[in-house]
Image (cartoon, grey):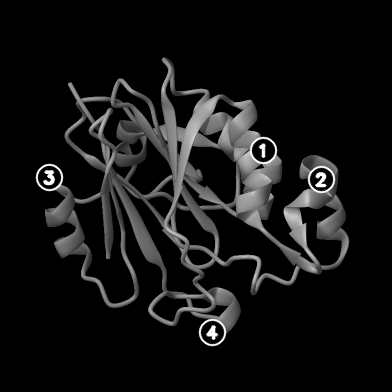
Amino acid sequence: MIALSLRESGVRVVFTDRVDVVSEAVALIGGGGSPAQLNQVHSAKVVMIDESLSEAEPIEADGIYIPAGHRGLASIRTADCLPLVVANRNGDAVVLHVGWRGLTAGIVEAGLAHLGGDGLVAVIGPHIRSCCYEFLGPERYVVAQRFGQASFVGDNLSLELALSGLLLRQRVQGVVSVDQCTFCNDVYHSYRRDGTPERQMTLVGAGRP
């Protein structure tokens, strides 16, 4: 379990692994009740935290916006895709499920559209990294057209490299990466490695007021 607190905003982030108990992660982050969850579909749709909680079943989306001062927790599930949290100085945050489909569809831009103010900071969680992410076929052309050949290391895709230029253009001033590969490190669930339906979670609690 990796826990972070973004000092200026007060936004709290926890990344779980395959052995962590979700209730313990919730207690660590200091939230109340069950985390808001989504039916993730590799889209560019981002919802408010209360929208995701208002449905009997999780709604189809790949990001949750949580405004400053909100007492609930937002969450996404990943097993090789990149979990991204972006916060502003005011304490607002978005948590995004970023695979190559969502990245090219515009999930990051959709998430950042919810964050006003300045001082944007991003946190990148555990995901399949360029050491293990062979990426060939027509999908490679789609990513290269959007994010350039610099997103690749030989035959392999780096989601983090593809994301870095986009975050820079969107005025994100700081990026923190936990530098963990889900494929290399068997403490994490990896769909590519094991074909598992299991996922780790990223939990986010809003900052001030």
**Contact flag, marks 2 and 1 (Cβ < 8 Å):** yes
Tell me the tag on residue 111: none
Question: Which residue is denoted by mark 1 in the rendering?
Answer: 165
Determine the residue positioned at 59% across, 39% down: 107
N-terminal of the two: label 4 or label 1? Answer: 1
Left or right, residue 92 beside residue 143: left
Callout 2 amino acid: Gly
Question: What secondary structure is marked by label 2?
Answer: loop
Q: Position of residue 125 (x, y in %)?
A: 44, 56
Tell me the tag on residue 148: 2
Determine the residue positioned at 54% across, 76% down: 183
**Contact flag, marks 2 and 4 (Cβ < 8 Å):** no
**Contact flag, marks 3 and 1 (Cβ < 8 Å):** no
- Quadrant location, the N terminus: bottom left
Examine the rendered structure and indicate whether residue 75 appears above or below residue 198. Answer: above
Q: Position of residue 144 (x, y in %)?
A: 83, 49
Question: What secondary structure is marked by label 1?
Answer: helix
Question: What secondary structure is marked by label 3?
Answer: loop
N-terminal of the two: label 2 or label 3? Answer: 3
Question: Which residue is denoted by mark 4 in the rendering?
Answer: 194
Mark 2 or 3, closer to the camera:
2
Examine the rendered structure and indicate whether residue 29 appears above or below residue 134. Answer: above
